[in-house]
Image (spheres, helix red, strand yellow):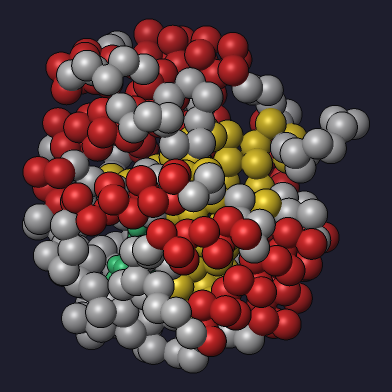
Amino acid sequence: MASELTLSDVRAIHELPLPELLFRAHEVHRAHHAADEVQLCTLLSVKTGGCAEDCAYCPQSSHYETPVSAEKSLAVPEVLEAASRAHAAGATRFCMGAAWREVKDGPAFDNVLDMVRGVRALGMEACVTLGMLNDDQARRLKDAGLTAYNHNLDTSRKHYGSIITTRTYDDRLSTLARVRQAGITVCSGGIIGMGESVDDRCDMLRTLATLEPQPESVPINTLVASEGTPLANLPPVDPLELVRMIATARILMPKSRVRLSAGRLSLSREAQVLCFFAGANSIFYGEKLLTTGNPDVDADRALLETAGLRAAPADGEVRS
Ligand code: SAM
Ligand code: DTB
Ligand code: SF4
């Protein structure tokens, strides 16, 4: 995608009549991906709660009174047991999240490196999301075999200041540049339903699509309105707005894996199938995201089966 992509270019795509938008997105999807495959990715919070950042959507921020309390980091063996169970259930990617503002050198980070090595040894892709990091930490993650680093832009530059004040949009972009520089693939997306305008949504997609190269992975989350956070009482997103967001992301970033991420518990099967048609080709798989719920494994297996879709094989595995 050309770097001169403008907000009005993105709006023009986003505002297409929905059938036309879906048609174009699906065409792009089929040209670049096996359109019947959905990657199953399991999440685990390896350090929950007590986070110093003030992200207005997040139940793990210590700035708000939420039902999530600060816990100790998980030990390496329990994380690898969870990864192994996820693998046995069919997940090919394991993503570990920590409620950190940034990575700090020391035993907790050394443990994360061991977790990454262990997940890779199971034959799974390993992704972590640990907040900001420096060049040396990015290099050590790469050396441990990390596949991807998740760090979301979350929203547009304009809307960002009303969601997070404890770090800037440019901090986020520099972290992404460090990850890229270290040779780790980039996972970056955002959240809809945080009171942003359609322009904000489109501008976030514009920023993601003009990164060079584009992120390999783009999670699109719907706000999980969490008790105690400043965004707890926002109205739910119309699922068709999510479909538009996914279709627009697919058209702008043809090769990226677009992930239908948080918020699926509020989506009908029909809405999820429309998201897959629009180009989403990954879901979080397992009863829990980081601290909130997600459809259970049986429901997701049944959804894929009913829709005639299949779990994507691990890289290098032959389709059966
Ligand atoms: N602390 C690290 C960071 O923020 O980079 C990593 C973990 S953080 C929980 C990862 C991402 O989860 C956030 O960037 C945000 O996009 C998403 N997220 C967190 N809470 C959410 C919520 N209530 N609803 C939807 N997405 C959420
Ligand atoms: C992403 O974009 N969504 C995931 C993952 N990256 C780390 C996290 C969703 C968290 C939803 C709220 C929770 O469960 O705490
Ligand atoms: Fe902390 Fe990440 Fe939650 Fe922000 S999104 S409060 S950085 S855990």
Among the 4 quarters of the image, the one containing residue 196: top left
Specify whether 217 is left or right of 199.
right
Among the 4 quarters of the image, the one containing residue 57: bottom left
Name the residue nearer the viewer: 264 or 168: 168
Among the 4 quarters of the image, the one containing residue 295: bottom right
* 146 in relation to 58, above or below: above
* 54 in relation to 72, above or below: above
Q: Residue at x 63, y 22 (%)?
A: 33
Residue at the far right in the pictured view: 320
Q: Residue at x 20, y 32 (%)?
A: 203
Is residue 161 something that shows in the picture? yes
Image location of residue 267, percent across then percent down = 45, 46
Q: Residue at x 12, y 65 (%)?
A: 165
* 89 in relation to 67, above or below: above
Quadrant showing the C terminus: top right
Is residue 247 something that shows in the picture? no
Specify whether 317 is left or right of 107.
right
Name the residue nearer the viewer: 45 or 304: 45
Image location of residue 109, percent across then percent down = 51, 77
Quadrant showing the N terminus: top left
Specify whether 184 is left or right of 78.
left
Image location of residue 49, percent across then percent down = 38, 81
* 157 in relation to 240, above or below: below
